[in-house]
Amino acid sequence: MSGFRIVFAAALAVSFVCPAVYSDEPLDPARLKVSASDSDAPQTVTTTDGRTLKLVWQDEFNGTGLPDESKWIYEEGYVRNNEKQFYTRARLENIFQKDGCLTIRTIKEKYPIEGKPGSRGRKEADYTSAAIETRGKASWQCGRIEVRAQLPKGKGIWPAIWMMGDNSSTVGHPFCGEIDVMEYVGHTPHRAYGTIHLHKKGGRRSEVVSKGGDVLLDRPEEQFYVYTLEWTAEKMIILVDDRVVLEFNRAEEEPKTEEWPFDQKCYMLINTALGGSWGGEIADDTCPTEFKIDYVRVYQ
């Protein structure tokens, strides 16, 4: 999701063997149901390579009001990618828990931002949204990370579930590494992307090398899918509902960078962007639109 690399995600993403599904059938009731309590989370999972992992961290978003401040902090302002939204801090109009979900709502509105962090000298924003992260609260190295979500809809929308290394504030991007578990852009509806980025060996400071994949889904803006990262020391796999979207093997990718960034913990970010370097043109009827997250679960 970080700024200077998104052209690589678009260029390098490769479609895998999941057929397009544009169904006229009724929505699957199982994909509409949300978890009702923390106890809904299985205490163990079996990975694609047969390992058993235990639940170590979760947020089921079964509360009300703002997200749990012991687990999440906010990004604020105009942050990256020349995007059009202003990320607000702890504003219920843009982010809230209700009915077992966390909702990030992106709104077209005139919102006063003069003097606020990240305002870039502007007095008023045309769009608002929210971005949260676990930086300084929780981070993980290896394991299985699951996020069940229903995606926002509309041309110009760009939601993401992603991770960056704990050293991002000291070494910067792309040296910290980036794992995009899910990205979605409204101008290519039904297609979810998974991409991993690292600094290109011998490249300019901002130059990245990336590997990505994508999958076509049946109405992901109307029902929930589970977006998953499985991570070992040797390999990362990105999946949607346990269908493989991307395999990223260390032995193949490590020679492309000076220093392997994934021998460290990474924190999670969840946000909805609008426009910018990959979101593109924004339709007049896109906003308001909602990104709903049923849960985040981490197994190790």
Image: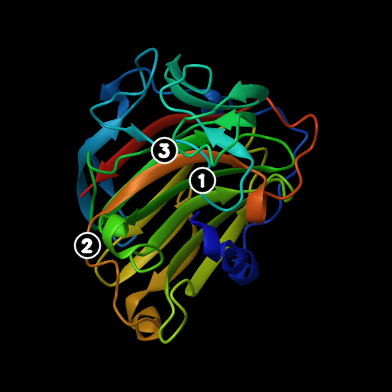
Residue closer to the observer: 50 or 213: 213
Horizontal arrangement in the rendering, residue 126 relative to residue 254 (left or right): right
Residue 66 found in image quarter = top left
Residue 264: assigned label: 2
Q: Tell me where residue 177 appears, x and y as whole percent.
A: 36, 64
The colour scheme used to paint the residues is rainbow
Circle 1 residues within 10 Å: few <14, some 14–19, many ≥20: many
Q: CA distance from mark 1 to mark 2?
A: 21 Å
Residue 174 found in image quarter = bottom left
Residue closer to the observer: 79 or 251: 79
Q: CA distance from mark 1 to mark 3?
A: 14 Å
The secondary element bearing badge 2 is classed as: loop
Q: CA distance from mark 2 to mark 3?
A: 22 Å
- Looking at the picture, which amino acid does disc 1 mark? Ala
Circle 2 residues within 10 Å: few <14, some 14–19, many ≥20: some
The secondary element bearing badge 1 is classed as: strand
Q: Is residue 93 above or below residue 283?
A: above
Q: Could one spot residue 42 in this view of the protein?
A: no
| Residue for badge 3 | 75
- Looking at the picture, which amino acid does disc 3 mark? Glu
Instruction: Residue at 63%, 64% (x, y): give it.
Output: 10
Instruction: Residue at 24%, 48% (x, y): give it.
Output: 139
Q: Tell me where residue 80 appears, x and y as whole percent.
A: 52, 50
Instruction: Residue at 47%, 71% (x, y): give it.
Output: 206
